Amino acid sequence: MSLSPLQSRLAASLLASLLVFVLYFLVASPQLAAAQELDAHKITYNDISLEVQGQLYEPDFPQFDRSIIGRAPSSFTSLINNVASDTNVQINNTALFVFEISSVSVRTEQETAELRRAALPEEDASEAAIERRQSPRTLYISANTCQQPKRIGDNNNAEVPQLVLYISNSTDNTSPGPDQSAGKQQRLVFKEGAIVYNTTLRGDVYFSVFAPNVAADKFDATASPYSVQVAASIDEPYHSYSNVRRAELVWIDSDASATLLTTKNVTSSPSELLSTPPYIMFAQNRDDMTINGMRNSYCGLSKWAQMRQLYDGKSRIKTGLRVDSLTNMTRQEFYLDGLNSSSRYMGFLASYQEPGSKRDVPGGGGVVLRQTDFETKPDGACTVIFNLTLCDGLQYAAPGNTTLFPDSQSLAAFYDNYTQTMYSNFDKALQQVACDAPPEGQWSLVRNCTDCRRAYKDWLCSVAIPRCEDFSSTDRPNLQMRNIKAPFANGSFVDQALLDKYGDQLAYTSSRNPAIDLQVQPGPYKELLPCDDVCYNLYQSCPAALGFGCPVPGSIGFDTSYGKRNPDGSLSCNYQGSANNIPSAAPVSLLPPHGIFCFVLVVLAAVLA
Ligand SMILES: *[C@@H]1O[C@H](CO)[C@@H](O)[C@H](O)[C@H]1NC(C)=O
Ligand SMILES: *[C@@H]1O[C@H](CO)[C@@H](O)[C@H](O)[C@H]1NC(C)=O
Ligand SMILES: *[C@@H]1O[C@H](CO)[C@@H](O)[C@H](O)[C@H]1NC(C)=O
Ligand SMILES: *[C@@H]1O[C@H](CO)[C@@H](O)[C@H](O)[C@H]1NC(C)=O
Ligand SMILES: *[C@@H]1O[C@H](CO)[C@@H](O)[C@H](O)[C@H]1NC(C)=O
Ligand SMILES: *[C@@H]1O[C@H](CO)[C@@H](O)[C@H](O)[C@H]1NC(C)=O
Ligand SMILES: *[C@@H]1O[C@H](CO)[C@@H](O)[C@H](O)[C@H]1NC(C)=O
Ligand SMILES: *[C@@H]1O[C@H](CO)[C@@H](O)[C@H](O)[C@H]1NC(C)=O
Ligand SMILES: *[C@@H]1O[C@H](CO)[C@@H](O)[C@H](O)[C@H]1NC(C)=O
Ligand SMILES: *[C@@H]1O[C@H](CO)[C@@H](O)[C@H](O)[C@H]1NC(C)=O
Ligand SMILES: *[C@@H]1O[C@H](CO)[C@@H](O)[C@H](O)[C@H]1NC(C)=O
């Protein structure tokens, strides 16, 4: 029986493979004298192993190679591409690692071969493969601190010393560390528990992680030694941190026990749809210093952060995707409850592999994005609401009552129902205007009913659902006291001096929207007034027959009804889509109409009529 061409090629390959292997074994001394020679061997060796790949020799070649050659002393951890190693490091000690170039050549050439078999004619492909072999690759070395010595005692604000990474690419220094001379290695101190380094992969790379000495009266390094996760990759850094991904976390608003945060767009086009949220989040009270020193470390945050949202479903962090109704762009929202009042927190957006997927993949160590700070309000007068139906862009704290509406959802349902009722009344009124008439019959050539509906919606949402701050927040422009005659939740009342001064003014003693006083019964609160352009836009977009009007700055009623946007874009008044710490879009330039004004309550009444 004769061999088929494939079989004979295989046989030849096998034979060659064995020969080369023996040759390699004989020639390669532990010192590996000439690098060029070694490379030559490897090329042959790799080519041959390629040919048999998938047919006979699937078992791990690099492992075999290493055990025979036995170059790395046993105290080294020999790292494999994209496979992390977790290890404890006692103080004053060094954990040694090696990344052997031979551990990647085979595997990657196999991949190249598979690709070229699929895509290219044989000859071109081998040229491409040779070229690829000749251009050196980048090796990424990265590490995360997973545990650090615990602080001892109260009021201990001492910074935990950071781990140190030593790297050597020379066989003269195979155990880099603090006792080697500086000329033979590089020394890099971790930043907040993380390090990401890259180097050109031309030979084996030796590196180590050194745990520095810590003050024995400040830290307990015995019960809680340093622990580090180290990885090497030729694809991309296994661990990374900071602004490496598009979206960042934006704080929207808080109440006394909860907060809402969002990412920026997580999709790059309106047609892109996501089924699972791409990010997770960690948060920590700033008074608790446990994670200080590990704030760039995915491993550290995922083990120690006070609030963690891993894929275990048991978290105080709720998350979901929101598609903006105007732009169809998707954002990811995070709602955190169970927070302490008057507290400062730090939040971290992070990305990680899908649940259940393998960790041993490029980037498998996770990405930590820049820290976002947020704080909670002191009293319970306001409750963060979001996820409303009509006011779909609304996300901020509104006047609440933790007795009558114990959670955000129940309060949101109240405002949702209220605004929907108002809107449907408005819509009935609008239909009586020549709305669906052809352009000639419409009231305006520039604005139509779609514009009017949108303007009304934005206005209604901003006016009927006040953006609420606690009564104790410091006075500033556009912050209007409301409901000052009502008792606080603890039964006490607003200062008598304030009551004497404003107690007879409706704008101070009631909410703008009477349903709030009747049904929600919040205590005294302050409202961040809606921006006046929200009203002008309504006035300009809707038929005059509906009777909308806006107060002019300086007129009676303006100061307690609307605010003006700050030219610098900071949050100075309320509009749909406003957030706490992103500068809003440039102010809309709309000239206030003259001679017409009408109070909001009148407008609401007109709409109801
Ligand atoms: C670590 O080294 C420092 C100085 O070399 C020494 O003072 C300290 O006692 C050492 N600590 C431990 C736990 O070995
Ligand atoms: C080792 O690293 C240094 C820079 O740190 C570089 O200049 C040198 O070429 C490297 N040597 C090898 C063999 O890769
Ligand atoms: C390698 O690191 C340097 C800084 O140390 C950086 O400028 C460079 O972009 C990195 N290269 C790659 C391929 O990531
Ligand atoms: C999000 O997408 C919208 C619509 O394309 C765009 O106007 C906005 O600038 C984007 N925001 C960010 C932060 O990319
Ligand atoms: C928003 O509401 C929808 C249903 O109306 C719900 O499925 C989703 O979980 C809510 N999002 C959050 C973050 O609660
Ligand atoms: C958003 O999606 C809806 C429904 O798929 C579509 O009708 C609308 O045109 C889209 N809007 C934009 C701005 O892409
Ligand atoms: C709230 O405060 C208590 C006491 O200071 C603290 O133990 C707890 O961790 C805090 N909880 C949160 C979520 O900040
Ligand atoms: C009652 O609550 C208000 C606001 O939350 C606060 O300013 C006031 O000091 C409290 N009064 C007492 C007696 O605790
Ligand atoms: C919804 O609002 C209308 C009018 O404001 C009110 O009559 C009705 O009782 C509300 N329904 C619910 C379920 O709150
Ligand atoms: C209303 O005007 C906008 C442009 O301002 C236009 O895109 C839209 O199609 C118009 N709608 C109707 C129903 O005419
Ligand atoms: C909330 O509602 C309850 C029950 O109607 C009322 O006693 C209390 O004063 C209200 N206000 C606050 C701020 O809780």
Image (cartoon, grey):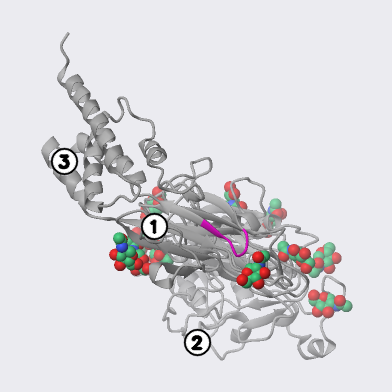
For this view, does 55 lie left or right of residue 460? Answer: left
Q: Residue 47 versus residue 581: which sits nearer the camera?
A: 47
For marks 1 and 2, the one nearer the N-term is 1
The quadrant the C terminus occupies is bottom right
Boundaries of the magenta span: 90-95
x, y percentage for residue 71? 40, 47
x 56%, y 78%: residue: 573
Disc 2 residue type (three-letter): Gly
Q: Is residue 61 above or below residue 363?
A: above
For this view, does 238 lie left or right of residue 61? Answer: right
The quadrant the N terminus occupies is top left
For this view, does 551 lie left or right of residue 406? Answer: left
Distance between mark 1 and mark 2 Cα atoms: 68 Å
x, y percentage for residue 404? 79, 59
Q: Is residue 278 above or below residue 111?
A: below
Please give the residue where the numbered disc 3 appears in the rendered image. 125
Please give the residue where the numbered disc 2 appears in the rendered image. 595
x 69%, y 84%: residue: 474
Distance between mark 1 and mark 3 Cα atoms: 27 Å
Is 326 within the magenta? Answer: no
Q: Nearer the viewer, mark 3 or mark 2?
A: 3
In the rendering, which numbered label is found on residue 140? 1
